[in-house]
Image (cartoon, grey):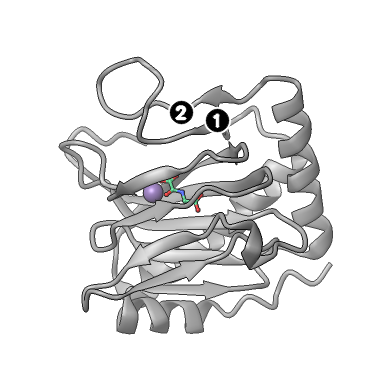
Amino acid sequence: MSTDRFDFKAAASALAADGWCVQPGLMSAEQTQALASECAAMHDAKLLLPARTGAARTASVLRGDSTHWFLTGAMSAPQQAFTDRIDALRVALSRELMLGLVDAESHYAVYRPGAGYARHLDRLRGSDARVVSAVFYLNDAWQEAEGGALRLYLADGTSRDIYPRAGNLLLFLSAQFEHEVLPATRDRMSVACWMRQRTPGWSA
Ligand code: OGA
Ligand code: MN
């Protein structure tokens, strides 16, 4: 399998220069398909749960996705393969950019047609643990007319729309970029991931 097409150095350079980038090649086509199949099957089996935001334990009006966290020690083969690649990327970015990224957390997300996620920052209330946000997309042959872009708001007041095409990895600095997920006309699947730094109370 050719999973060595992802250019770690180019990703690090783009993050340093612009704070964000989109690159293909993190996973092979077969690995990407395996993640997509498993995510769809788990969603069909009702194993993804409505995502929560904030302290309230009610389903959020801000976000309409359902998620399943990848659990250490209980990962499927596709989840483990993804986690191994993300960890390799985390180590490379941490070294190139001196970020002190100690771990990563990932979940599947499915947005049904019409569901989105309002403009937000990926820093959870009161925590600066999340340093790099990574979103790996799982949707074959996505068309712009189907909507579902991640809209990334840049410091100069403009924005970029990133469509959730299978095999593309979006990276951005969690503290710097507000973003939103626009509703789509078909199911929209991804793996969302955050690379984290050590914070007070952190334990391995
Ligand atoms: C998130 C998020 C973006 C996406 O889960 O915080 O912004 O494109 N996801 O799925
Ligand atoms: Mn987000």
* Dot 2: element: loop
* Dot 1: element: strand
Where residue 111 appears, as percent x and y from the top left, is: 58, 39
Q: Which mark is residue 66?
A: 1
Quadrant of the snapshot with the C terminus: top left
Q: Quick one: label 1 or label 2, which is nearer the N terminus?
A: 2
Measuring 74% from the left and 46% from the top, which residue is drawn there? 35
Q: Kindly identify which residue carries mark 2.
A: 51
Quadrant of the snapshot with the N terminus: bottom right
Q: Does the beta carbon at disc 2 come under 8 Å from ligand 1?
A: yes
Measuring 69% from the left and 78% from the top, which residue is drawn there? 5
How would you rate the neighbour count of disc 1 (Cα within 10 Å): few for under 14, some for 14-19, many for 20 or more? many
Residue located farthest toward the top when viewing the structure as drawn: 57
Measuring 62% from the left and 66% from the top, which residue is drawn there? 144
Is 145 on the left or on the right of 18, as rendered? right
Where residue 146 appears, as percent x and y from the top left, is: 65, 57
Q: Amino acid at mark 1?
A: Ser
Camera-nearest residue between 102 and 48: 48
Q: Is residue 173 above or below residue 79?
A: below
Is 162 on the left or on the right of 62, as rendered? right
Camera-nearest residue between 200 and 186: 186
Q: Amino acid at mark 2?
A: Ala
How would you rate the neighbour count of disc 2 (Cα within 10 Å): few for under 14, some for 14-19, many for 20 or more? some
Where residue 64 appears, as percent x and y from the top left, is: 48, 33
Q: Measure the C-alpha gap from mark 1 to mark 2.
A: 5 Å
Mark 1 in CB contact with mark 2 (< 8 angstroms):
yes
